[in-house]
Image: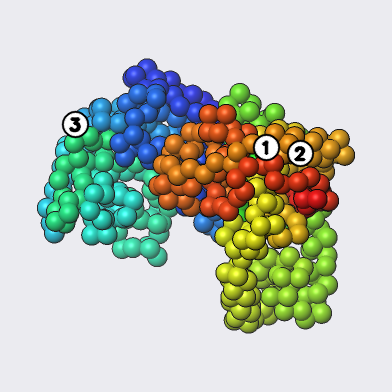
Amino acid sequence: MTLNEVREKYLEFFEARGHTIVPSAPLVPQNDPTTLFTGSGMQPLLPYLLGKDHPGGVRLANSQKCFRAMDIEEVGDNRHTTFFEMLGNWSLGDYFKKEQLPWLFEFLTKEIDIPKERLWVTCFEGDEKYGIPRDTESAEIWKNLGISEDHIHFYGKKNWWSRAGEPENMPAGEPGGPDSEVFFEFTDVPHDFIYEATCHPNCDCGRFMEIGNSVFMQYVKKPDGTFGLLPKQNVDFGGGLERITAAAHDNPDVFEVAHKNVIKHLEAESGKKYEGNAKVPFRVVADHVKAAVFLIADDVKPSNVERGYVVRRLLRRAMRYSDMFGVESGLSAIADIVVSDYVGVYDLAAVADTIRDEIHLEEERFRKTLARGLKELEKGTDAFTLFTTYGFPIELTHEVAREKGITVNEEVFKREMEKHQELSRAGSEQKFKGGLADASEATTRLHTAHHLLLKALQIVLGPHVKQRGSNITAERLRIDFSHGEKMTSEQLSEVERIVNEKIKEDLPVVHTEMPKEEAEKLGAEHEFGAKYPDKVSIYSVGSLDNTFSIEFCGGPHVTHTGVLGTFKIQKEEASSAGIRRIKAALL
């Protein structure tokens, strides 16, 4: 049974039980600047679990793409991956434990054919301090379904969910509740006594693998510190698609199930077999390339900052490991296999050329960086200089240094990096809010022109254009924006024409304060990765009911565009991978 078959069975199963199938959200969270990536199935649906009405109704299901950057270093064992899919179903105040647990049991044992004897479950043991009872209801449901009593274990905080963690850490008004996890037992994997004297579902020996978790949002913390029942109780289930498929195969190695086509390719290219010590580099390459493919497809390009740096790190680690066993075809060929594996599920084919090109460009950059860095490392250049001057990541410095028997002084690196970061912070504090050098009349005029320029770029190049940085002085404005290729002279001329046209129309520049959600509904542009309060400041060029440009912004701005003068683009150039930069002035 393949990943695609298990996913299809799951969605059909819950659709037949009245669930609306919702599409996977992008890996880049929408309207959530608190995290870089979508890391769980419930993350995009959190507003609805907290009370907002969902247009799809009260029963929802999907398979959500997820990426967890913190798992990069964990990749290499038989089950940790950075990219995975989370099968999910939700009840928003509709059904609860008596429906959820039997449905899950039926899906696993009937649809996927997992023997019930191989399933173990865990439940919440209760919290006496806060008067939260032991979840005997879930345990009884599992027993009635046929899970033997010795396969049911109770735990404390491991089986409690809230955004703040265990009950003691929850603020007043915060919802939470017990959860019930399901584990698959690999009977051919003996208990390793290096971990614990006795084995149990949460043991780390590898005998058990968690494949699903049903969260029951049942309680709310009161102002007096006690807990009461929520008036509207929810179910949030998440199950790893790759892990459930591995359980269906009775195979503890997730990679042999979820990455088999890439592994076959690597075996053929390298002449080595996926066994013994070779498994680690095979797994790293397979996982990292797949993750990079999906991130690039969601418009995250390799770069030196934030999300882009994560993609760069994935690809460069994959290149280093592929070099270990002599794969000559490069990572682009592996990316093609990933795209092919998901035909009919995710529309990767539509951006396959972009994916291939970005990976190829990053390979070229990395080869140059590697050659320069190795020469400097052999000369004795310190890790901090390698990082800041040559773009040589510290983790890569460690790897190549080990290979050559060179010692890296990590304390010096940390000390120098702290100094570097302190200088950067000091410099940032001197800048005016929003990237403005000051609040002079000239700077204010260019700030308003900046808004016109961003909208004109979106009109000419497409809606993918987003601001990725700005700096405005009294002499010129600078904008960094997402776009994958050099602009043509015709495109630059058209952008100039649009901006100057809006200046001549002498449009009003209107300042409004409104709830953040309302501003988002109006399509207001906002800074990439920034966190905004519930009430935000909006500037629109044109009235709100007939606007040309609308952005989250704290100002200052002119009151109408007619005072700006003539707009002129001075230079267009690359800023970083997938990011272009324009410098412009008002004459």
Instruction: Please identify the residue farthest to the right as the structure is shown.
Output: 489
Q: Which residue is identified by label 3?
A: 144
Report the Cα–Cα distance between label 2 and label 3.
Answer: 73 Å
Residue 196 at what x, y percent from top left?
A: 33, 63
**530, above or below 523, in the image:** below
Residue contact between numbered discs 1 and 3, judged by CB atoms under 8 Å: no
Residue 523 at what x, y percent from top left?
A: 54, 35
Report the Cα–Cα distance between label 2 and label 1.
Answer: 10 Å
- Structural crowding at the residue carrying mark 3, measured as other residues with C-alpha within 10 Å and reported as few (<14), some (14–19) or many (≥20): few
Q: Secondary structure at mark 1?
A: loop
First of labels 2, 1 by sequence position? 2
The color scheme shown is rainbow
Specify the quadrant of the image occupied by residue 343: top right
Q: Secondary structure at mark 3?
A: helix
First of labels 2, 3 by sequence position? 3
First of labels 1, 3 by sequence position? 3
Q: Which residue is identified by label 1?
A: 506
Q: Is residue 417 visible?
A: no
Specify the quadrant of the image occupied by residue 262: top right
Determine the residue positioned at 63% across, 28% down.
Answer: 347
Determine the residue positioned at 82% across, 43% down.
Answer: 486
Q: Amino acid at mark 1?
A: Asp
